[in-house]
């Protein structure tokens, strides 16, 4: 067994991109140090903040909640409110959610749960069934990939939950892999102007009705979140969503994973390229976002920007002919 590059104890894992072997303590220190670094550089959590923490029971959000719990005590006067959005995916979210509940109990935090079924009138399983039946019955129906629907519903649910909890920030478990994927996806879709709206802190412009999203894990890899959970003994769910195979993100993720295996460090390189580029385009994007007119959806009252008559979630529900409860 190799010795830890930092302290000489038995190493348990290797960081291929720096060629360092690390013991359990040193790895956890590195992981937490990176969260503190993101917090410092992007002003994520501050005294007085009420932070809604998006948890799912997966490795990323479990690691995030655990480290933020430490960080909140270090900073002082920071209240954490974990939120779980239950998409209604049988055999996946209900199983993963148990881990989120367990960790919240361990940390003495109250978990708030919101479901698609209650918010939108249909679970994700029902949305998929509806989409598939409409596709076979109506040639004009334009079916979208699962994550297109789910992403919009999830974003809306999280923002609504954060608002109702009186949160000043909404922490999401996006890691370096997620940012690198999003960066490449924007380039591949020829949507470089969208780069200004992603990053460690998405709330470039404070907009009424939107809680500022913060991403404390951007300097950690996805695999490192799993290693951290294992080493800290945190409960987490490793299984994937049954609908994930439909997504463009999945294709980009596979590509990046095989590229990283051959050329360790490319995910961090992509992240740093993105952050440098973002600085250059941030001013333009900020002005544009500030000038964007905000509306409140006539159907569900959620805030939205854009050209539609209702918010994106309500537009999808109408297309799917799903009656909302609210
Ligand atoms: Fe929703 Fe797609 Fe994530 Fe599954 S993979 S939970 S469908 S966004
Ligand atoms: Zn709406």
Image (tube, helix red, strand yellow):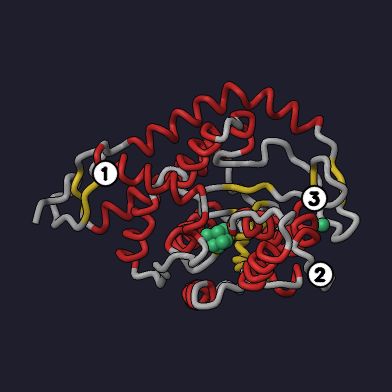
Answer whether labels 2 and 1 touch (C-beta < 8 Å): no
Residue 326: image location, x then y, percent: 84, 70
Residue 223: image location, x then y, percent: 34, 54
- Count of numbered circles on the image: 3
Whether ligand 2 has any atom under 8 Å from the Cβ at mark 3 is answered as: no
Residue 209's disc is 3
Residue at the image point whose x is 82% and y is 70% from the top:
323
Q: What is the secondary structure assignment of the residue under circle 2?
A: loop
Q: Which residue of the protein is positioned furthest toward the right in this rendering? A: 298
* Residue 195 visible (yes or no): yes
Residue 63: image location, x then y, percent: 43, 60
**Is 191 placed above or below 175 here?**
above
Decide which of 46, 255 is in the foreground and name it.
Answer: 255
Instruction: Classify the position of the N terminus by image quarter.
Output: bottom left
Q: What is the secondary structure assignment of the residue under circle 1?
A: helix
Circle 1 crowding by C-alpha within 10 Å: few under 14, some 14–19, many from 20: few
* Residue 114 visible (yes or no): no
Which sits earlier in the primary sequence, circle 3 or circle 2? 3
Q: What residue is disc 2 on?
A: 324
Decide which of 248, 157 is in the foreground and name it.
Answer: 248
Circle 2 crowding by C-alpha within 10 Å: few under 14, some 14–19, many from 20: some
In the displayed structure, does residue 147 sit left or right of residue 34? right
Residue 261's disc is 1
């Amino acid at each position: 067994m190799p010795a830890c590059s930092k302290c000489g104890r038995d190493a348990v894992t290797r960081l291929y991109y720096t060629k360092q072997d690390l013991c359990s303590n040193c790895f956890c220190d590195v992981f937490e140090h990176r969260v503190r670094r993101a917090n410092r550089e992007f002003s994520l959590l501050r005294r007085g903040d009420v932070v809604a923490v998006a948890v799912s029971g997966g490795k990323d959000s479990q690691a995030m909640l655990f480290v933020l719990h430490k960080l909140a005590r270090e900073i002082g006067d920071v209240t954490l409110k974990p939120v779980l959005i239950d998409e209604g995916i049988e055999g996946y979210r209900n199983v993963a959610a148990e881990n989120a509940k367990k960790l919240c109990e361990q940390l003495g935090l109250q978990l708030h749960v919101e479901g698609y079924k209650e918010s939108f009138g249909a679970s994700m399983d029902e949305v998929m069934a509806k989409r598939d039946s409409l596709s076979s019955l109506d040639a004009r129906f334009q079916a979208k990939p699962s994550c297109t629907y789910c992403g919009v519903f999830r974003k809306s649910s999280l923002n609504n939950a954060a608002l109702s909890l009186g949160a000043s920030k909404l922490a999401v478990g996006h890691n370096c892999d997620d940012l690198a994927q999003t960066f490449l996806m924007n380039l591949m879709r020829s949507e470089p102007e969208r780069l200004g709206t992603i990053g460690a802190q998405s709330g470039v412009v404070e907009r009424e009705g939107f809680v500022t999203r913060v991403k404390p894990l951007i300097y950690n890899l996805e695999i490192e979140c799993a290693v951290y959970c294992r080493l800290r003994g945190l409960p987490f769910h490793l299984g994937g969503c049954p609908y994930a195979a439909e997504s463009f993100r999945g294709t980009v993720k596979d590509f990046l994973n095989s590229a990283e295996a051959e050329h360790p460090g490319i995910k961090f390189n992509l992240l740093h390229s993105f952050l440098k580029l973002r600085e250059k385009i941030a001013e333009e994007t900020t002005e544009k976002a500030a000038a964007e007119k905000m509306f409140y959806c006539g159907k569900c009252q959620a805030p939205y920007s854009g050209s539609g008559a209702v918010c994106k979630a309500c537009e999808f529900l109408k297309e799917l002919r799903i009656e909302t409860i609210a």
